[in-house]
Image: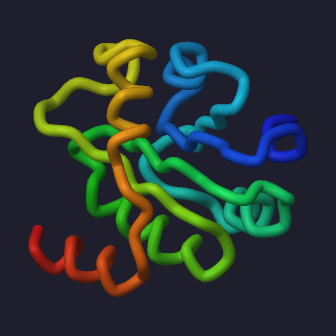
Amino acid sequence: IDALALYNTVNIVESETNTLTLGDNTIGLGGKSISDWQFSCLIKSPVEKYNILLDPDAIEDALNLSMRLIQYKRIKCVSWVGTQDVNDLGKRVTKYYIKHTPEKSYSQLLKQKLEL
């Protein structure tokens, strides 16, 4: 939770082990979904942008979270092809995906969700 007070951009991943791969500006949800308390912490924080990097099997959960958060913060919903998670990809490859994923609007996220 310290990352929410320290960084302008924070990565959101599924697990604590994924946070160790990406570094101090990363928080783990403890699963694919977010609790009401966690969501409240995210929107109340001074963080300006969230990069959401849930595992490929949780793309719908990632899009749902993105669509909820976009009303309050800037969002990148980062995805990749395959079954690997952040730990499997490694820091360098994951940062590449973050850098090359554009921020999207609510309507763009909705369109992506409907295409699943």
Q: Which residue lies furthest to the bottom in this view?
A: 107
Quadrant where the C terminus sits is: bottom left
Relative image position of residue 114 (x, y in whole percent): 16, 80
Q: In this figure, which colouring scheme has been used for the structure?
A: rainbow
Quadrant for residue 77, please give it. Answer: bottom left
Name the residue: 40% across, 69% down.
104
Quadrant of the image occupied by residue 29: top right
Residue 92, position as x, y percentages in the image? 40, 15
State the image coordinates of residue 53 (x, y, percent, origin top left).
Answer: 42, 42
* 1 relative position to 113: left or right: right
Residue 99 image position (x, y, % from top left): 42, 38
Indicate left or right for 111 with 67 as reference: left
Answer left or right for 26 relative to 17. Answer: right
In which image quadrant can residue 37 be found? bottom right
**Would you place residue 53 above or below residue 111 in this image?**
above
> At x 68% / y 76%, what residue is drawn?
72
Q: In which quarter of the image is the N terminus?
A: top right
Residue plotted at (43% across, 27% down): 95
Compared with 44, 3 (above or below) is above
